[in-house]
Image (cartoon, grey):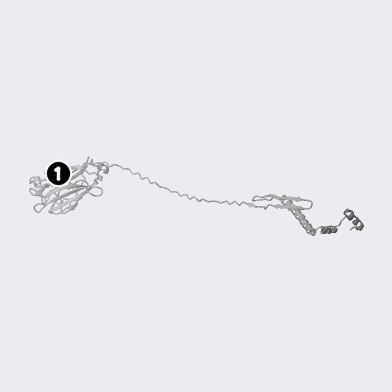
Amino acid sequence: MLPIRRSTIKKSKIIKVYIRPQTQPCELIGYFNKRCSCCFFFWIFGVLLVGFAIAAILVALLVKSNSTTTTTSTTTTATTTSTTTTATTTTTTTATTTKTTTTTTITTTTTTTTATTTTTTTTTTTTTTSTSTTKAPIFNVNMLNNGDAETGPCETDSNVMNPPGWTCNGEITQLAYNNTFIYSRVNTIPGTASPGGCLFYGQISGYTSMWQTIDLTNYADPSLIDTGTVEFNLSAWLGGFINQNDRAGVSVTFLNQANQTTGSVTNIGPVTDTDRGSVTSFLFRQATGFVPVGARSATVLVYIIRAAGNVNDGYVDNVNIFMYQ
């Protein structure tokens, strides 16, 4: 520190001329202390501000060098704005820090598995080929079994012998014309009826019968029957002994698929003693008509009734039924 002469100072004070000597730091501090009691505080504050400014500049430089970083999954953008305003005596540093926002995009891939169940339906079609063959009709043929009393043995005396091929009720018998029982009664019949070797008679019963059920579809196709154009013919030789009214008759009943009667019952006979003129003989009887629509079978019934004496002298031969068109 250079000495200051008092005379000089005084002179300066008198003439009010200030000469600034070369000052030292300590003198400067003392000078400020003289000027203001707060100068030291402001000095410290200024130093701190300068320090903050330098730090802010360094931060700005560092941020600028790494301002933009781009990766596949993260984008980081940092923007730093530094404004420094410097005055003669005061330095103001404004540091603006922009918050770095990291946006992470997570892509979630949702895999939807659709299970498709395929149901295979196998349809088996069975084709049944039905060949419908129209049966050729069998017309003008007797549909009865043993309608002429010539099948199987024939009785030659007073024993009972039910005719084969028929369902019998009672003592109806298949009898030979040449017999030892009633030969004298029937020996004149062959000449009137051409009956063959045997006949049916009532034996000694008061009432007796026999019957057969015929399947009509064996002789004509059902579709043909159902046209209503098929006809039938029922016939028989019916007789008796002299003036006794023992008599016989025949009927036919048509049945449908349910075995119910269809149409009306057709009868021939009975032949009475009056019809025969009280003569032992046969008389030919027949009836015709249309087979009812829906008919599938026919039942032929032969019955013999005793009216006098001990023997049932109702006689029947050559029972016949056939269809025609």
Horizontal side, residue 32 vs residue 105: left or right:
right
Q: Position of residue 126 (x, y in %)?
A: 38, 46
Instruction: Name the image quarter holding the C terminus.
Output: top left
Disc 1, SS: strand
Which residue appears farthest toward the front when viewing the image?
14
Front one among 82 and 136: 82
The residue at which mark 1 appears reads as: 285
Which residue appears farthest toward the top when viewing the image?
325
Q: Is residue 7 above or below residue 134?
A: below
Mark 1 belongs to which amino acid?
Arg
Front one among 323 and 197: 323
* Category of crowding for the residue at label 1, using alpha-carbon neighbours closer than 10 angstroms: few (below 14), some (14–19), many (at least 20): some
Q: Position of residue 155 (x, y in %)?
A: 15, 51
Q: Position of residue 76 (x, y in %)?
A: 67, 51
Q: Position of residue 300 (x, y in %)?
A: 19, 48
Q: Is residue 285 above or below residue 91?
A: above
Front one among 95 and 102: 95
The residue drawn where x is 85% and y is 58% is 27
Horizontal side, residue 124 vs residue 254: left or right:
right
Instruction: Name the image quarter holding the N terminus.
Output: bottom right
Can residue 198 be seen by looking at this rendering?
no
How many numbered circles are shown? 1
Horizontal side, residue 319 vs residue 122: left or right:
left
Front one among 274 and 149: 274
Can residue 168 be seen by looking at this rendering?
yes
The residue drawn where x is 14% and y is 50% is 304
